[in-house]
Image (cartoon, helix red, strand yellow):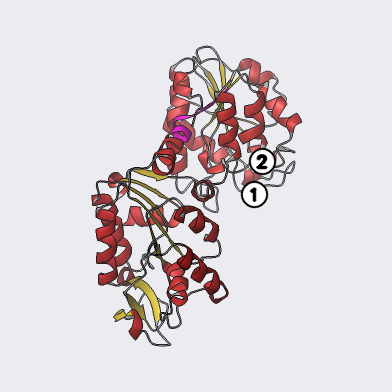
């Protein structure tokens, strides 16, 4: 991919507009409870400030109604935390689209936070009128919000078309570099792990991946659906019976690419205190629930991962939140961490599992993209990325 990077742009004395992803969780009082995304956005802001730019930052937060922001939609608490992390004041600006005194007063080395961008009428529909107004606020536009790259909105797509310069921030650039390394020109064998509760939401991803990967490992409810398709037993486990025929078609279309579980850790009820029982797939009873992979299945997958050149991981193998059923996900995560392969992981549950088992510093790259990560895996064009590529070729 060809795109301009903030690090290569001379920003001294210029006004820099950064679209960040500061959509963080808050408690009932509005206090930030997890500032991971704010911290991830710091490098772009700090770089621009250090090189003498006047910086404006905006983000979405929650799902506000355009033109009708209420106090719960405000970025004010995020601005407080951002200021603490930057070690300098961060003023919140409301009604910012048309510029005005706040823009004239913004000096190099200063940073302001522009109120929730999704409160602006036309943001979600990528209004060209709105995008043009925002583009006039800056000399340089920086998209550093990969998590919104799959949406064509005014602050992620339209403004990039009209700004004098449009580039990727360090977080966006790192995401695109990692995804390109994993999927555009991977070191072989390329192994993908796709797991989770529902196969219906990931069927198109599976087909797209199977056309490119050497091996696809499945887990969770997705694996159960494929076990049924292969004639195996899953008892009362989560699966999607209406998609068994589709799963059969995939197995027939890509023979040998999807190794299925041989054994599983089961329970009679779905709760953390349920007694775990190891069973071979053919011995699973009608009232059994598959909640984790068994050790024989895990050992087979570990051998595949040890020989991989590139690994893409999306979704935990079992109910990792409960310790009695976490061993499969833990073992797979440790195998990925120990593999010489370049590894790329993404998705909320995957990131939670990585954090639980202390693997973060041993995974090649952890994507914060969520929906954008999945759509990239599916092979879809991400509008915000496509616009950066278009501007990068100018």
Nearer to us in this view, 152 or 35: 152
**Residue at which label 2 appears:** 118
Q: Could you tell me residue 364's position as x and y percent?
A: 32, 43
Quarter of image, res 142: top right
The reply to whether residue 358 is in sight is no
**Range drawn in magenta:** 166-173
Label 1: which secondary element: loop
| 167 within the magenta span | yes
Q: Which residue is mark 1?
A: 63
Q: Quadrant of the C terminus?
A: top right
Decide: few, some or many residues near mark 2? Use Cα within 10 Å; few <14, some 14-19, many ≥20: many
Q: CA distance from mark 2 to mark 1?
A: 8 Å
Residue 102 % position (x, y): 65, 21
Indicate the secondary structure of the residue bearing disc 2: helix
Q: Nearer the viewer, residue 73 or 224?
A: 224
- Residue drawn at (30%, 46%) of the image: 309
């Amino acid at each position: 991919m060809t795109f301009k990077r903030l690090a290569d742009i001379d920003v001294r004395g210029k006004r820099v507009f950064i679209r960040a992803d500061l959509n963080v969780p808050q408690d009932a009082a509005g206090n930030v409870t997890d500032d991971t995304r704010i911290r991830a956005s710091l490098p772009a802001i700090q770089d621009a400030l250090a090189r003498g730019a006047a910086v404006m930052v905006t983000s979405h937060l929650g799902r506000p109604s355009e033109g009708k922001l209420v106090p719960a939609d405000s970025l004010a608490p995020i601005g407080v935390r951002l200021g603490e992390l930057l070690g300098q004041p961060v003023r919140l600006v409301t009604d910012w689209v048309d510029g005005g005194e706040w823009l004239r007063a913004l000096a190099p080395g200063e940073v302001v936070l522009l109120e929730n961008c999704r409160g602006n009428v036309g943001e979600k529909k990528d209004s060209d009128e709105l995008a043009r107004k925002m583009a006039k606020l800056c000399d340089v536009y920086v998209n550093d919000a990969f998590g919104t790259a799959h949406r064509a909105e005014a602050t992620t797509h339209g403004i990039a078309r009209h700004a004098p310069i449009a580039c990727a921030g360090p977080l966006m650039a790192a995401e695109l570099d990692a995804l390109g390394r994993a999927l555009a020109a991977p070191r072989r064998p390329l192994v993908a792990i796709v797991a989770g509760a529902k196969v219906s939401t990931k069927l198109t991803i599976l087909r797209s991946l199977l056309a490119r990967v050497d091996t696809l490992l499945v887990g969770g409810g997705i694996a159960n659906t494929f076990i049924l398709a292969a004639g195996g037993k899953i008892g009362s486990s989560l699966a999607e019976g209406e998609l068994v025929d589709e799963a059969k078609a995939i197995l027939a279309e890509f023979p040998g690419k999807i190794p299925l579980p041989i054994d599983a850790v089961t329970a009679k009820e779905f709760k953390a205190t349920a007694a775990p029982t190891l069973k071979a797939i053919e011995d699973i009873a009608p009232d059994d629930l598959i909640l984790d992979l068994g050790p024989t299945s895990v050992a087979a997958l570990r051998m595949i991962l040890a020989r991989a050149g590139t690994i893409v991981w999306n979704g935990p193998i079992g109910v990792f939140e409960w310790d009695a059923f976490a061993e499969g996900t833990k073992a797979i995560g440790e195998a990925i961490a120990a593999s010489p392969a370049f590894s790329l992981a993404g998705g909320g549950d995957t990131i939670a599992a990585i954090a639980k088992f202390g693997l973060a510093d041993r995974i090649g790259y952890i994507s914060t993209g969520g929906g954008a990560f999945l759509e990239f895996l599916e092979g879809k064009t991400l509008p915000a990325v496509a616009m950066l590529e278009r501007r990068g070729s100018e």
